[in-house]
Image (tube, rainbow, N blue to C red):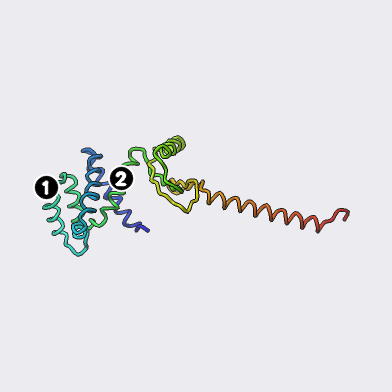
Amino acid sequence: MEDPRAESIARVYADAFLNAAATENVADALEEFASFADDVLERNPDFEAVLLSGMVGRDEKVALINKVIGPYGSPLFTNFLRVLARHDRLELLPLILRESQRLQELRMGRRRVQLRAARPLGPAELEQIRTQLAASLPFEPVLEVQEDSKLLGGLVIRVGDTVYDSSLRTRLKQLRSRLRERSLHEIQSGRDRFSHPEGD
């Protein structure tokens, strides 16, 4: 589970990052942020460990950012990293990136929709699902797809706190419940007939 307080702090920095980037090209700023996470941190775990470590001082981290990132990064992004270093928030970089992407989607009238499927879905199927969702939702859906073999078949779609479950497992469970209710009803009806025979 994510720490709600960490998510809240990350959201504040993400909002500040997007606001600063608004005077420039936000798409480029987010692309640079994502590229830094994927192409620099992920591919250089030793550098990531030092940059995100709580054992390395703020001034040392700022100096490292100036030396390693400053010559290559944009002034906006490099300064953003310096701010995070000075406030001991660099460890929140993955959360801040995720929140930045989510907030930017919201600003553009988009929202993430989690989609769980029992099998891999092809591009045509995903586009059909996205089109159907877009027609019924007040925003443009951005699909996050996850394969889940436990579903047996069908889909589970989550929009915020609302879950739409059309999975085969759920349908079978509902069918068993209805059959059980029908059996109990028939048993009770039989008892009633026997307890009140005709002619009494």
Q: How many numbered marks does the figure carry?
A: 2
Mark sitting earlier along the chain (2/1): 1
Residue 138 visible somewhere in the drawing: no
Numbered tag placed on residue 34 in the rendering: none
Q: What quarter of the picture does the N terminus occupy? A: bottom left
**Residue type pointed to by label 1:** Pro
In the rendered image of this protein, does residue 124 appear above or below residue 36?
above
* Side of 175 where 183 appears, left or right: right
Residue at position x 42%, y 49% from top?
147
| Disc 2/disc 1 C-alpha distance (Å) | 25 Å
Residue identifier under label 2: 101
Q: Is residue 29 above or below residue 169?
A: above
- Left or right, 84 with respect to 68, comes to right
* Residue 83 position within the rendered picture, expressed as x and y whole percent measured from the top left: 19, 52
Marks 2 and 1 close (CB-CB < 8 Å): no
Which amino acid does the dot numbered 2 rest on? Gln
Residue annotated with mark 1: 71
Is residue 191 left or right of 152 when viewed as pictured? right
Q: Residue at x 12, y 56 (%)?
A: 63
Taking the view exactly as shown, the residue that stands out farthest to the right is 199
Q: Quadrant of the C terminus?
A: bottom right
Judged from the image, the secondary structure of the residue bearing numbered disc 1 is loop
Q: Residue furthest bottom?
A: 55
Where is residue 41? Give x, y as percent: 22, 53
Establish if 12 lies above or below 131.
below
Q: Position of residue 19 (x, y in %)?
A: 25, 43
Q: Is residue 163 visible?
A: yes
- The quarter of the picture where residue 52 lies is bottom left
Left or right of residue 148: residue 195? right
* Mark 2, secondary structure of its residue: helix
> At 15% across and 53% down in the image, what residue appears?
65
**Disc 1 crowd, CA 10 A, few/some/many (<14, 14-19, 20+):** few
